[in-house]
Image (cartoon, rainbow, N blue to C red):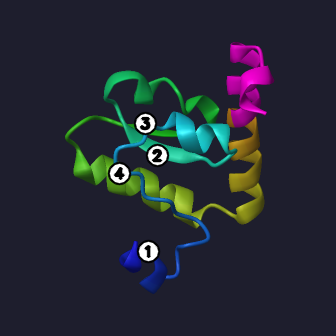
Amino acid sequence: MALVVATGFADRLVLLDERFAGEPTLMGVPCVTADVGDDAILPGAAGEVAPKQNSVALAAAMARLLDMPAEQRQTQGSKGRERVERESGGTQFR
């Protein structure tokens, strides 16, 4: 986390350790994940999925998200949250 703060990306980047991609999606935050398990299906239009064990593709996806204007990231994140709420019935995440 110190590296994220030091590079100035703290307002745009959350590093997940053992959490899954659904957590930022539920918070309305766009995410980047690897194509591993259920994480690959959660982001939908609210993020990007990189092939597993492909650090170059993962870094490229992260760079695209970091370079995205704030308004576009917010819109993308909102769409992800709306999708999860719609597909789950919506009430359990409020």
Q: Quadrant of residue 4?
A: bottom left
What secondary structure is found at the residue carrying circle 2? Answer: strand
Q: Residue furthest bottom?
A: 6
Q: Residue at x 44, y 56 (%)?
A: 62
Q: Position of residue 70 (x, y in %)?
A: 72, 64
Judge the density around disc 3: few (<14), some (14-19), many (≥20) Cα neighbours within 10 Å: many
For marks 1 and 3, give the CA distance: 21 Å
- The quarter of the image holding the C terminus is top right
Q: Amino acid at mark 2?
A: Val
Judge the density around disc 1: few (<14), some (14-19), many (≥20) Cα neighbours within 10 Å: some
Circles 3 and 2 in contact, beta carbons < 8 Å: yes
- Residue 49 - label: 3
What secondary structure is found at the residue carrying circle 3? Answer: strand
Query: Foreground residue, 85 or 62?
Result: 85
Query: Foreground residue, 26 or 54?
Result: 26
Q: Residue at x 76, y 42 (%)?
A: 78
For marks 2 and 1, give the CA distance: 15 Å
Q: Amino acid at mark 4?
A: Asp
Earlier sequence position, callout 1 versus callout 3:
1
Q: Residue at x 39, y 79 (%)?
A: 2
For marks 2 and 4, give the CA distance: 13 Å
Mark 4 lies on residue: 17
Earlier sequence position, callout 2 versus callout 1:
1
Earlier sequence position, callout 2 versus callout 4:
4
Q: Which residues are magenta?
A: 81-94
Q: Quadrant of residue 43?
A: top right
Mark 1 lies on residue: 4
Q: Is residue 56 left or right of residue 32?
A: left
Q: Look at discs 2 and 4 and give the one toward the viewer.
A: 4
Earlier sequence position, callout 3 versus callout 2:
2
Q: Amino acid at mark 3?
A: Val
